[in-house]
Image: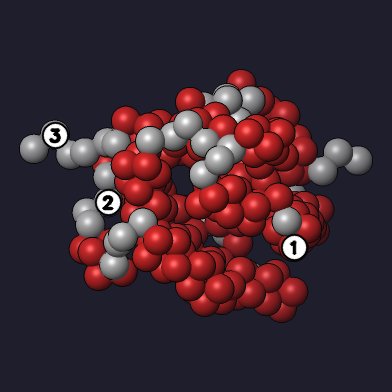
């Protein structure tokens, strides 16, 4: 039987295949990305992670099984502690303080993506919530694997350090654990597939838009 996660990815492949080849991604992995663009991305991504933690906390409260609730809380705890601490060190290397980053207004695409996640988790089922967050976890892993060879020519230590997280075995296993939780929820109680697909597709589109936002250093018009 085909896993739900594989089916979802297959049905949005027209979007999914664009993620590893986005100009921002290619320039980041090759080391050609201007530092000001990476700074912009880092600030926006830190603020995005705050929304991701909130969404995972909501998912845990919706979970019908202890196993799924524990998974969501473990991911939320990892992001709120280890991942945030790693980001704070990276921001320091970029000459940015945490206070500056928190004060920065989220770009329009960033705000829309976070609002989508929180709204989906607040109004939807545990499965719908996990599906809304899946493209973020999964696509970063696949982007890293597809572009890993570019790192051989990347002379920017900060970019290599950033990419190494998503190439690690620990991150790969975390992604698989998350996918298994999504697949298990579907197998236990199948939902309306078209609704779940629409959520996954929208999240995948937001992932592409997030890279594009960082590439253009998107700002509010006024």
Outermost residue toward the front in this view: 155
At which x and y percent is residue 108? 27, 42
* Location of mark 3 (residue): 221
Q: Quadrant of the N terminus?
A: top right
In the image, residue 66 sits, relative to residue 53, either above or below, namely below
Q: Earlier in the sequence, mark 2 or mark 3?
A: 2
At which x and y percent is residue 53? 48, 67
The secondary element bearing badge 2 is classed as loop
What residue is rendered at 50% in x and 52% in y?
A: 158
The secondary element bearing badge 3 is classed as loop
CB contact under 8 Å: marks 2 and 3: no
For marks 3 and 1, give the CA distance: 40 Å
- Foreground mark, 3 or 1, reads 1
- Can residue 208 be seen from the camera position used here? no
What residue is rendered at 18% in x and 39% in y?
A: 220
* Location of mark 1 (residue): 170
Outermost residue toward the top in this view: 14
């Amino acid at each position: 039987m085909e896993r739900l996660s594989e089916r979802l990815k297959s049905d949005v492949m027209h979007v999914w295949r664009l993620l590893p080849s986005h100009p921002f991604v290619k320039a980041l992995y090759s080391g050609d990305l201007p530092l000001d663009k990476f700074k912009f991305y880092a600030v926006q991504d830190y603020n995005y992670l705050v929304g991701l933690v909130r969404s995972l906390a909501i998912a845990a409260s919706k979970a019908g099984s202890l196993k799924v609730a524990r998974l969501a809380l473990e991911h939320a705890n990892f992001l709120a502690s280890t991942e945030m601490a790693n980001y704070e060190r990276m921001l320091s290397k970029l000459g940015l303080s945490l206070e500056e980053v928190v004060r920065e207004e989220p770009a329009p695409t960033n705000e829309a993506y976070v609002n989508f996640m929180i709204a989906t988790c607040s109004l939807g089922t545990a499965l719908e919530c996990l599906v809304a967050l899946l493209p973020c976890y999964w696509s970063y892993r696949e982007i890293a694997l597809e572009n890993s060879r570019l790192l051989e020519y990347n002379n920017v230590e900060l970019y290599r350090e950033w990419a190494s997280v998503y190439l690690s075995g620990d991150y790969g296993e975390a992604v698989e654990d998350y996918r298994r939780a999504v697949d298990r929820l579907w197998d236990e109680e199948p939902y309306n597939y078209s609704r779940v697909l629409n959520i996954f597709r929208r999240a995948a589109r937001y992932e592409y838009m997030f890279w594009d936002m960082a590439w253009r250093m998107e700002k509010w018009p006024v």
